[in-house]
Amino acid sequence: MTSKDAELLLCKMQFNFSNLLTDLRGLDLQTGLFTFRQIKAATNNFDVENKIGEGGFGSVYKGVLLDGTVIAVKQLSSKSRQGNREFVNEIGMVSGLGHPNLVRLYGCCIEGNQLLLVYEYMENNSLARVLFGPEHLQIELEWPTRQRICIGIARGLAFLHEESTLKIVHRDIKATNVLLDRDLNPKISDFGLAKLDEEENTHISTRVAGTIGYMAPEYALWGYLTYKADVYSFGVVALEIVAGMNNMKYRPDGNYVCLLDWALVLQRKGSLMELIDPRLGSNFNKEEAMRMIKTALLCTNPSPALRPNMSAVVSMLEGHVTVQELNMDPSIYDDELKFQALRDKYEELELRNSSETEILNPSSHKIHGGSSSTTTQDLYPISLGSSY
């Protein structure tokens, strides 16, 4: 599917949703069309025992097709404008993408009022649950696995930004949107907020949508969106991988707003090794760990112009390129750019735009720290208590 086809699909389906199935069949989409009967059989009629997630825009079920393929079925509400938009975006953006670090969309089902997306099933749920979910659901991640996960995420983003026919800004890179397969290989998921970015050296002016704590300052405050916003989000996730802590949940004391805030202070003190997850003990590669931390801090520079592109990030993490050190004074976030200002501004945006399509409804979840999330429904929510 070409970028022109993708844009046509997004326009046609948003304004003529009743003809969605016809529109899908008329485009060269690399996804399958499933019947509702097939999905019911695969999920045992949406048995509650197969439910692996639930949120504001529907539920997610584990299923098995007749050929033995294990799937994850995301059920969206056709009555929700946000659900419709997410459905459109997922198909339009992901249908033609193929990369080992992007979750695979097998297809969709549109029958009556049913809107279903069918993905490959990821045995180990999300990176967020593995790293800092409920203790009984966590998995011990040794350093080589963390290094591999971090590089895999970077490669997936490099593909989206620089290598794919469709140049895509994901807009919601976070630990819950990184899924892990049986061998703990990472795959980026949830393209419900993604935007096409065909023109280089330009930005997209758009309403803010994403998750506070992972959003770049220029985007959260002014709606200035480029692929560098994903680079910033990746930097936050990389810090979480090193520290084993949720960015917005971690506060060593009242002087720090989040994990990134603490990391900036430790950088100034020359004590970055304090960031390392204590669960690793001494069993980690110090050179690789320091490289990951410095790369993460470079990615989260307040200035998008000073952030690297993702192909450069991959080279840094693999040790092929020296990481450029930028010692930032934490006070750079004072005044309008300080973390608290981001939170206040974001909550103001949510109140003002609560009825818009890219803002969650009142039943939406809140993330740690009292801040709001305007993300679409995660495929594998971290709060899930299921064994899946």
Image (tube, rainbow, N blue to C red):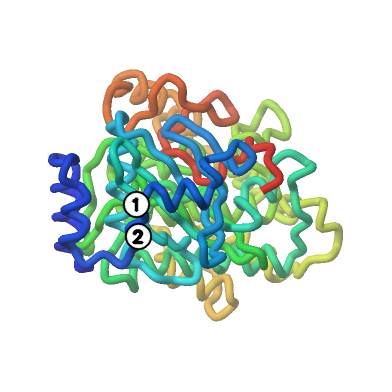
* Residue tagged 2: 94
Rate crowding at label 1 as few (under 14), some (14 to 19) or many (20 or more) other CA atoms within 10 Å.
Answer: many
Q: Nearer the viewer, residue 37 or 3?
A: 37
Seen in the image, is 253 located left or right of residue 171?
A: right
Looking at the image, can residue 303 be seen? Answer: no
Q: Nearer the viewer, residue 307 or 74?
A: 74
* Residue tagged 1: 90
At x 42% / y 38%, what residue is drawn? Answer: 375
| Numbered tag placed on residue 284 in the rendering | none
At x 21% / y 56%, what residue is drawn? Answer: 24
Secondary element type, mark 2 = helix
- Three-letter code, disc 1: Glu
At x 68% / y 69%, what residue is drawn? Answer: 288
User: Residue 54: horizontal and vertical position, in percent?
Assistant: 53, 35
Secondary element type, mark 1 = helix
Kindly check if marks 1 and 2 are in contact, taking CB atoms under 8 A apart as contact: yes
Give the Cα separation between the discs numbered 1 and 2.
6 Å
User: Residue 32: horizontal and vertical position, in percent?
Assistant: 34, 62
At x 32% / y 58%, what residue is drawn? Answer: 33
Looking at the image, can residue 157 be seen? Answer: yes
User: Residue 305: horizontal and vertical position, in percent?
Assistant: 35, 57
- Three-letter code, disc 2: Val
Q: Nearer the viewer, residue 48 or 23?
A: 48
Seen in the image, is 323 located left or right of residue 195?
A: right
Which image quadrant is residue 44 in?
Answer: top right
